[in-house]
Image: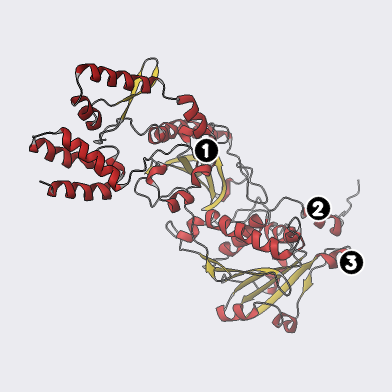
Amino acid sequence: MKEIDHPPFAPALVESMRAVGYSLEAAVADIVDNSISADSHHIALRFSPYGEPHIAVIDDGRGMDSRELVDAMRHGSRNPGDVRSANDLGRFGLGMKTASLSQARQLTVITLQHGVLSAAEWNLAVIERTGQWTLLSYEQAEIEALPYVDDLRRQGKGTVVLWRNLDRLAEGEGSVEAGLREGMTRVREHLSLVFHRFLSGNDRSGRVEISMNLDPVKAMDPFLTWHPATQRLQEQALRISGADVLVQPYVLPHYTKLSPDELLMAGGEEGLRRQQGFYIYRNRRLIVWGTWFRLARQEELTKLARVRVDIPNSLDTLWTLDIKKSSASPPIEVRRSLSTIVGRIGETSGRVYRFRGRRTAGDHLVHMWDRIEGRHGTSYTINREHPLCASLSGLLEDVERNGLEQLLLTIEKMLPVDAIYADMATDRSLIRQRPDYSLEELADLAGRLCDACGDHPDMRRNLIRQLVAMEPFSFYPERTQTLMQRLSNER
């Protein structure tokens, strides 16, 4: 039996690899991975649709010498089975080349290490002309004429990954200018989420700064860990094949506790349900998010639940990580443990998201609605002891009081639960959980309650003190404090 060296035809293979499925944002993220793995602390994206349209990623990492550069430009430069540094974000040795050439026909890498510049280039026109894996190596004089060389010299070290001949950006947009403008908006959003732990610098290693045309990229924390109402549940460590998989569940605040900007960071009302689920991180880099891996359904009662799962790169094979680092699937050992965790956090999320009138331990608010659990299910009743109900009832004669009770019972029985659930399940903005009361409307309600106290000053003072713990006043603590001061000063 003979052994035949049978390399693939370069022009055909490289064109096929362009169709592996990279989006622009995933491709840029792959280049940022390399920069972080090279110990970069400042990563600058530069792009322009004018002159010679281009995208460049400039980092201040350790750089490469000429031998390392040529090796890095080889397709499959690393065996995915090799043991890597615990902080290495790569795997297949294909990312920089495949990601870059999926978006551009010309990939140039310029690098500076120990004062020596090196540059090499893959140019698809050259590969097509020669029919070979023809890598271009730049001479020193040619390197000096390349873009962003001065940036490297100012830094003293680092690497530039330069994309030119951006043929894919014009597809579907009509022009490179329009495609670059729309595409880089998506890139910013993608980087702010995928690298949010590096951008914030809140855990383990130091902070990494990323900018786009000198404008800093800000971290988008999907767990709102900085918000006081976010619940951080107990972390668990799952021991798999000699390595730890860390599972940290979070339950986000109810959206009525979020400002418009905070709600936007959580995905908005429309995205709140779609972005629930597991968030899989490999060496702090987000890989997959917004899925329960079929261990649970995306539904209203779990929409506030998000679970951070940290996996080391030593378990890449078990998690079937793909080339683009945009998909992964948990092994069976992990799925069993995650299934148990899902049930626990789903109940916690449900308690936050269920109707706001439910009485819970430690809740000293006077709610308008009570949630009643029974053997045959759950029902909601109007709280007859709420001061608004009690004061109105106290002003009525027996016959009128019976009429009020019949009205309240009818409202309870006719509550359109199915319609409310359907509207929420489709993320329609038809239901406002928080009533929109102005200060004047709150003052009118409070005045009626005070009038019901009659000639009992102690009762009036007690009522005023309790306003801030009473719905709907509890939704507006600042307005209510102003109102309480006003009522206290009245004779």
Whether 264 is drawn above or below 393: the answer is below
CB atoms of marks 3 and 1 within 8 Å:
no
Q: Which element type, helix, strand or loop, lies under badge 1?
A: loop
Q: Amino acid at mark 2?
A: Ser
Image quadrant assignment for residue 355: top left
Mark 2: few/some/many CA within 10 Å (<14, 14-19, 20+) = few
**Residue tagged 2:** 16
Above or below — where is 89 with respect to 125? above
* Secondary element at image label 3: helix
Quarter location, residue 202:
bottom left
Residue 136 appears in the figure: yes
Image position of 266 with respect to 393: above or below = below
Q: Residues within 10 Å of mark 1 (few under 14, many from 20)?
A: some
Q: Nearer the viewer, mark 1 or mark 2?
A: 1
Give the x, y percent position of residue 360: 29, 31
Image quadrant where one finds the N terminus: top right
Q: For the residue marked with disc 3, what is the amino acid?
A: Arg
Seen in the image, is 327 located left or right of residue 3? left
- Residue at the bottom extreme of this rendering: 141
Sequence-wise, which precedes: disc 1 or disc 2? 2
Q: State how far apart marks 2 and 3 are (Cα).
A: 17 Å
Hey, what amino acid is under mark 1?
Answer: Asp
The mark nearer the N terminus, 3 or 1, is: 3
**Distance between mark 1 and mark 2 Cα atoms:** 40 Å
* Residue 88 visible in this rendered orientation of the protein: no
Q: Nearer the viewer, residue 467 or 29?
A: 467
Rendered view: 179 above or below 362: below
Residue that numbered label 1 is attached to:
427
How far from the left and from the top, in percent, is residue 258? 40, 48
Label 2 residue SS: helix
State the residue position of label 3.
129
For image coordinates 71% across by 74% down, the residue present is: 119
